[in-house]
Amino acid sequence: MPHAAPPKNTAHLLFEVARLLGRRLRTHFEGTGLHRGQALLLGRLWHGDGVPQSELSRDLHLRAPTVTRMLLRMERDGWITRQSDAHDLRISRVFLTPRAQALQDEALRAFADLEEEFLADLDDSERQRLAELLRKVHRRAIALQGSLHGAAAPKDTTG
């Protein structure tokens, strides 16, 4: 007789879903040569490029050296270019290349496909509620990450 799987707490389930989602995302992008983090960085730039490198670090919740290494690889592979700011040479701005711009529609379809695959068993109201709850958990995770770097994690008082 097979053993029943042990109950999983919510944190374990979130981790497992994120891992499985990452695995599926890799299969969508494996032909491009992009890694998951690079795809997420491109996703941020598709909302507006020409942003300072420091803003990418903040928006992606990654340390500056991590983003620097990622950008070096992406620049080498033809996904982005970096240019010094015209008014402040200490600022490096990041721009999409035509190659990265051409991938946008395909990437958006891949994310929509993944969402549909993973949420197929949920109706519209369940999907909306899940998104609301995940946004709340995301805000808290960001606050906790900040506390690891010396800032106090505020209590989330939003509904």
Image (cartoon, rainbow, N blue to C red):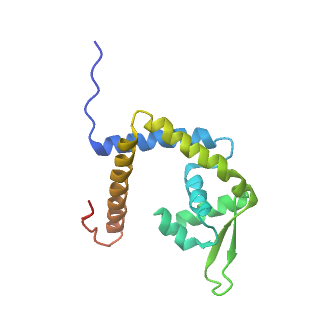
How many numbered callouts?
0
Name, please, the residue furthest toward the bottom: 87
Residue under the image location 41 percent in, 40 percent down: 17
- What quarter of the picture does the N terminus occupy? top left
Residue under the image location 48 percent in, 69 percent down: 58
Front residue of 3/27: it is: 27
Q: In which quarter of the image is residue 25?
A: top right
| Residue 134 position (above or below residue 48) | above
Left or right, 67 with reference to 156: right
| Residue 156 position (above or below residue 29) | below
On the image, the x and y values in percent for residue 118 come to 46, 37
Left or right, 57 with reference to 80: left
Q: Quadrant of residue 142?
A: bottom left
Residue under the image location 40 percent in, 42 percent down: 124
On the image, the x and y values in percent for residue 60 come to 49, 62
Left or right, 35 with reference to 63: right
On the image, the x and y values in percent for residue 158 come to 27, 63
Name, please, the residue furthest toward the front: 124
Q: In which quarter of the image is residue 149?
A: bottom left
